[in-house]
Amino acid sequence: MNKSIMIVGVGGQGTLLASRILGNVLLAEGYDVKLSEVHGMSQRGGSVVTYVKYGDKVWSPIVGKGEADLLLAFEQLEAARYLSYLKPEGKIVVNTQRIDPMSVLAGDGAYPDGVLEALEAAGAAVQRVDALPLAVEAGSPKAVNVVLIGAMAKNTDIDKEKWLAAVRACVPPKFAELNERAFMLGYEKGE
């Protein structure tokens, strides 16, 4: 049976590295894996989404509405934007960090209150992860992406050591130790 994961965030958050780590570990597990990265205005803080499908045989990476088993959201509003893609029994792993979109920065709107509560009220199984302080603890605020991959990894039956091997395979050697720490801090927070 095929599974679907969507990784959503805004440009500059490292969603693409997260998708590479995920793809690497799934391939190492012997799955057929298809990824599709969609870049909006990614260099300007716009929405970025990666579709990941894996299983015995996968024909297309595209995840339709109501098909995602898991939504890994790097930002609250992005979780809300893609909520309709989640299966009724799906799960959201969401960073509690708030990043104001361009409309808010330009003064054309306000960031809505209660986004996480609205996700839960919609019936989604939501795991909140305050990833930024964990990334800083690991050694860099830029490691939020790997903290979130760690929290997500706890939701899988793939051995932690295989995830760590994928992290090492996907980051430059000089950043391996920092990213391993980030992964473990996220993994410890996972459910």
Image (spheres, rainbow, N blue to C red):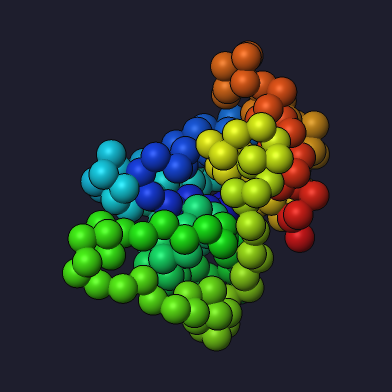
Residue at 54% in and 74% down:
116
Residue at 57% in and 24% down:
170
Q: Position of 110 compared to 117: left or right?
A: left
List x then y, in percent, for residue 190: 74, 55
Q: Nearer the viewer, residue 97 or 68?
A: 97
Query: Considering only vertical position in the picture, is 62 above or below 171?
Result: below
Number of numbered discs on residues: 0
Is residue 149 at all visible to an observer of this figure?
no
The image quadrant that residue 168 belongs to is top right
Query: Considering only vertical position in the picture, is 26 above or below 125?
Result: above
Residue at 70% in and 36% down:
138
Q: Position of 96 compared to 79: left or right?
A: right
Query: Considering only vertical position in the picture, is 136 above or below 100?
Result: above
Q: Position of 19 compared to 154: left or right?
A: left
Q: Position of 4 compared to 101: left or right?
A: right
Which residue is farthest top?
Answer: 173
Q: Quadrant of the N terminus?
A: bottom right
Residue at 50% in and 53% down:
74
List x then y, in percent, for residue 159: 80, 39
List x then y, in percent, for residue 178: 68, 27
List x then y, in percent, for residue 77: 41, 66
